[in-house]
Amino acid sequence: MRWLLVLLGVFPLFANPFLIDYPEKEFLQEEDYRLIQEKLHSLSIAPTLDDLYPKSLPFTWPWQKKPLREKSDFQGRAERGIRQVLIESSSGKTPKKELIKINQGSDYCIVSYSSLNGVYPELLQKIPKALEQTGFQGYFLSLLGAFPNPTGKEIRYAGVPYCFKLFAMLEAKKLGFHKVLWIDAALLPLRDPTPLFHCIEDTGSLLQRVRNGKRYLLPVTRDIILERTGTDMYQEKSLRARVIGFDLSIKKVQTLLQEYEELVALGTPFLSCFPEEFVLGALLAKNPDFWPAQPFPHLVFNEHKCHGKSIESIQELGAFFLIQQH
């Protein structure tokens, strides 16, 4: 019934399934993180997906060549936020936000976030040394277990899957940076990323558009995004969000951030296998001329595709980052 209501356009009846009840608080203490984590871990996305996932399988639209991904695939991605570990006092693991000067520093800032579970903390902690070795002059903002919460309200949305990337960039803005580059915690810097910041200075952004495929987007989520943004993500490209750059001081970026925050507050636009990529792709498609494609053909290289290639040979291809196996 809930799915039918959404298809009929009664979107307000479908509440944010990731939202936690927590007061706005800009500076969080360990006890806050413990309570927030308890609230996150008490959430369950399974009932929502039971309502929204098509009942007839394999489900395809007439123009799809492959069936929709299985419900378990959507559930695994949707639960990333509510399953994250922010604090583990018994083993001494607590949230840590650290601004690290790389070489001589500059007004360029790279940011990344990882929860405390899984392999990502170890990968995140490799980034500063690797950046130093590339010769980069700037700063690295490391958010380890410290979910980005620049204004105090974002922590309520910690369960929204993969919503943290733009919030992390706003943490850097809060520290006085405007030219900011997000990189996933699994990315190991191979080359000096300064040219990426030159692109940000020239165009206001660094973005890579791709087609993620309709099979990774629930039909209900497609309808919600279409209703809220006017963009049909069964037709438009989404955003490859491993590396994102913005000049946070310019108007078009500030408008994008505001619209993004509104969709995070809804929560439901993030019910897909590539949550933040479909959402940001929809927002970018509203004004495509504002967002030129980034000019680097080999921004990221997958480690599992190395096939014996040396780091030097990968660097010669022009790759700035290596996706580490995990």
Image (spheres, grey):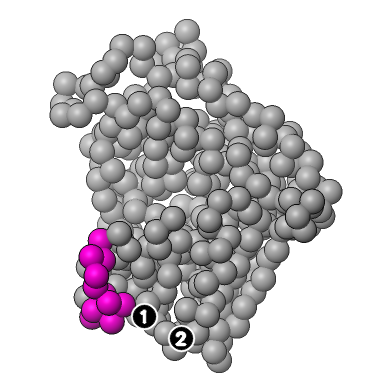
Crowdedness near tag 1: few (<14), some (14–19) or many (≥20) residues, C-alpha within 10 Å? many
**Residue 133 marker:** 2
Residue drawn at x 40%, y 63% as measured from the top left: 324
Left or right: 155 as drawn, with respect to 63: right
* Residue at horizontal 28 percent and vertical 31 percent from the top: 215
The amino acid type, in three-letter code, at marker 1 is Arg
Residue 227 sits in quarter? top left
Image spot of residue 318 (x, y percent): 25, 76
212 sits to left or right of 30: left
Identify residue type, mark 2: Gln
- Asked whether residue 85 is in view, the answer is yes
Above or below 24: residue 5: above
Separation of disc 1 and disc 2 at Cα?
9 Å
Q: Which residues are magenta?
A: 305-316
Tell me the tag on residue 242: none
**Residue 307 vertical position relative to residue 38 in the rendered view, above or below:** below
On the picture, is 260 further left or further right than 296?
right
Residue 198 in sight in this render: no
Could you say whether the residue bearing mark 2 is in a helix, strand or loop? helix
Q: Which mark is residue 191?
A: 1
